[in-house]
Image: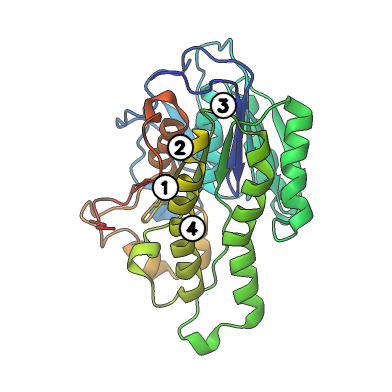
Amino acid sequence: MKKLYQYAACLLLGGLVATACKSTKSPGGQVGSVRQGQGVYQYSDETAKNSPFYSDRKGVIGRNGMVASARPEASDVGIAIMQAGGNAVDAAVAVHFAREGANVAIAYTEREEEDAQRTKELVEAEGRHCLLLSGNLRHPAFCEKIVSDTVSRFGTLNILVNNASVQYQNKSLEDISDDELIETFETNIYAMFRVARAAIPHFHEGDCIINTTSVTAYQGRADLLDYSSTKGAIMTFTRALSSNLASKKIRVNGVAPGPIWTPLNPASVSAEEVAEFGQDVPMKRPGQPSEVAPIYVYLASEDASYVTGQMIHPNGGTIVNA
């Protein structure tokens, strides 16, 4: 893989922000190659414990996602900022960026303190630094603060990863309260606008934004009407912003995961639903966070220098013609 960071900076919201100071080659090698590895699951759910673990390196899946094994020493230094520290995909992305030489700053809510601290440990186990930023992305001032604090601490910002989201299951439109509707839109899409707006003035040619949407943006989901709507908005925002920034040679892409194992699965649905999770896709299984995280690394690397306005779909084989 070619250079991951040209100048070393990435911000991931609801997920990860990575920054780099200087960079030559990606010290971790071909992160994008996925082979069956050996791992240990620490999810409380028995189904998750028995799920297959795939990664290009040996590691451990914990409550926050991927725990990496030792990697080669890196001469380059970067930064990743992460919000929603309890999201296994977020943590996996943070660790994968750390493996490639990035330091990580995590923006998270107060109730996610334990998970954020755990993710910090995983990043530091890779020999990188981790900055913790506690707050609420629904507040415009905090959206600006995580960018300014990152730039103040590390001196630069090159990659923004927007990954924060909330969802509430409701059987009908009439069941969705205004409070839930506003929270879902403020967290999932308003924050993307606000953080990107704050970050872009710090960007230079070759920098990039990576937004996380979902397969629900293309298929919809009957019990996630407001969530699906925000994910559709993220897809359109990504395409529009890519056109807007193309003349500045700043790339904007997105990732649209399908069913991916996270601690939210057993925590938010019945045991019967957990047992069936991911069985409706062609590969007949859910994906693992470590199968999604390398996509973010690829989109931030020079290997993706001709890729903008695009979505990558780690969804187990579901065909998306949009």
Would residue 85 be seen by someone viewing this image from the given angle?
A: no
**Residue 182 image-quadrant placement:** bottom right
The Cα atoms of the two marked residues, 2 and 4, are separated by 16 Å
Would residue 241 be seen by someone viewing this image from the given angle?
A: yes
Amino acid marked by disc 2? Tyr
> Are the two marked residues, 2 and 4, in contact with CB atoms closer than 8 angstroms?
no
> Are the two marked residues, 1 and 2, in contact with CB atoms closer than 8 angstroms?
yes
Amino acid marked by disc 4? Ile
Task: Write down the residue under mark 3.
Answer: 98
Point out the image quarter for the N terminus: top left
Q: Is residue 134 left or right of residue 85?
A: right
- Pick out the residue farthest to the front: 247
Q: Residues within 10 Å of mark 3 (few under 14, many from 20)?
A: many
**Badge number at residue 296:** 2
Amino acid marked by disc 3? Ala
Locate residue 64, reporting x and y percent.
56, 44
Task: Write down the residue under mark 1.
Answer: 255
Q: Residues within 10 Å of mark 1 (few under 14, many from 20)?
A: many
